[in-house]
Amino acid sequence: MRKYTRQVVLLALAVLVLTVAGRLLTGSTRQVSLPYNPPGEGESLPVPYVDDPEILRLENVRFEPGRFVFDVVPLKQGSALVGLRDSRGRDLPEIIVFSVDRFQTLYNENNGSFTGDTVVMIGLTAFLLVLSAIMLHGYLSARGPAFYAYSTVFYIGFFFFALITGLTMLLLTVSHLARPDSFSMMSVYTSLSGASTLFMQLTAPLLLVFCAALAVSNLALLRHNRPRIQNLLGMLLAFLILAGGAFGFWLSGRNFSGSVTEYRIQSAIENVYSTVFVYFECILAGAVVCAFRAARRQPPMDRDIIIILGCWFRKDGTLPPLLRGRVDRAVAYWREHLRLTGREAWIIPSGGRGPDEPMPEAEAMKAYLLQQGIPERVILPETRSANTLQNLSFSRKIMEDNGLSGPVIFSTTNYHVFRSGLWAAQAGLRAEGIGSRTRWWFWPNAFVREWIGLIANRWKQELVLLLLMDSFFALLSLTIIG
């Protein structure tokens, strides 16, 4: 991930340099306009004026249908009003408030535009679109053991967010180039601060479909298994997504009347909430994509070590469908490996003895392997582990004790492949996974547990990143829009 972090930092610096260079090339003079209907018969045109001629100067004043157009030249730092004054010396209501900074940059306080804002729009658009391309490349280039990383989930999950925000900025930039008066920087500020709200609204139909699928699969799961809290996770997540989305829509759809400060506070609350919702939505989307890709991937048939991750088995010593599927998947790989390479791969069935199990899971798997015709000389049971990380860590110790090294294949259930790959990296193994199929109604609920585990394993890092994102969008809402 450090490689892509450096690329993003370099991209940001390049955009900043180009934006500054563009600002310098555009100069300080800015063309603006004031709306004014054509005068009636016998009426004379009003005259544009500046209330403080030491701050600003107007040049090239001309009247076009429906508006006065003129160039505003900043003279020194300060603020001034530009308006229209009729032939009787009365000030008309159409005014623009300008401010000039020490760099002679002219700011239109009415709509947030400033000298060189077009270059800034183009720079922001380029940054977001290139950022989305970097994230997509980071996801697609993660192959083999490198695929099993939290960064892979982050890349593909937030790729969608960066892409949609970038396309929104592209639309605003093109609109600004065509009609600069109608699409000013205030549109950009509002769009950026509300990027999470927009993303939540655009992805709402997909979330509805996802929640419906979760509910249907959960009902089917309850028909085949006894009601337990673990078997209700899918329905609980569907409810939280629907309730959270509905609350977000309620926040963004409220009518507002009040001061600019109150509006900014409301916008900040709305955008912070949307950011929290979208953050977990992106992590969920990334986890779903990575889980499907990991479950469907077919690793190379040249791995000489196969680890089978254990789970619960029956008291009579026979394997239930879930565990039998893992062992069958490993046996199929072993046989195909033997056919293609002529070598017998080592098999490490891994799993200790649970409180309600008559023997270690590894011994039950070994008995089944022998029934399938696997030679006992290639089976190295690991009988002490109590969880997935121990499965892989203790299996690595067995590899070291037997002088085995090299890349590893681990066999587990399809929904468990990606997270097991994360544990394998933590255990110091260069490993890829193969997944056995499970019933369709079992997969979604089991995956929800995997997603919760992904977040729980890195909750401190996730919290820091979430706080940074929230702070950014809250700052935009409180200081710029309005």
Image (cartoon, rainbow, N blue to C red):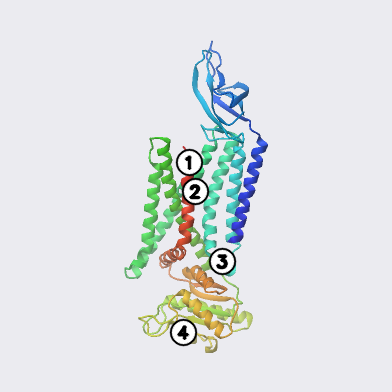
Mark 2, residue position: 472
As drawn, the label of residue 163 is none
Label whose residue precedes the other's in the sequence (4 or 1):
4
C-alpha gap between disc 2 and disc 3:
30 Å
Q: Residue 43: give x, y in percent of width and height.
A: 53, 12
Q: Judging from the image, what secondary structure is the residue with disc 3 in? A: helix
C-alpha gap between disc 3 and disc 4:
31 Å
Amino acid type, residue under disc 1 in the picture: Thr
Q: Residue 119: give x, y in percent of width and height.
A: 62, 40
Badge 2 vs badge 3, beta-carbon distance below 8 Å: no
On-image quarter of the N terminus: bottom right
C-alpha gap between disc 1 and disc 3:
40 Å
Q: Which of marks 3 and 4 is in front?
A: 3
Residue at horizontal 58%, vertical 27%?
55
Q: Judging from the image, what secondary structure is the residue with disc 1 in? A: helix
Label whose residue precedes the other's in the sequence (4 or 2):
4
Q: Judging from the image, what secondary structure is the residue with disc 2 in? A: helix
Label whose residue precedes the other's in the sequence (2 or 3):
3
Q: Which of marks 4 and 1 is in front?
A: 1
Residue 144: name its quadrant: bottom right
Mark 3, residue position: 147
**Residue 55 showing in the rendered view:** yes
Amino acid type, residue under disc 3 in the picture: Phe
Q: How crowded is mark 2: few (under 14 residues within 10 Å), some or many (20 or more)?
A: some
Q: Residues within 10 Å of mark 1 (few under 14, many from 20)?
A: few
Mark 4, residue position: 368
Amino acid type, residue under disc 2 in the picture: Phe
Badge 4 vs badge 2, beta-carbon distance below 8 Å: no
As drawn, the label of residue 479 is 1
Q: Residues within 10 Å of mark 3 (few under 14, many from 20)?
A: many
Label whose residue precedes the other's in the sequence (3 or 4):
3
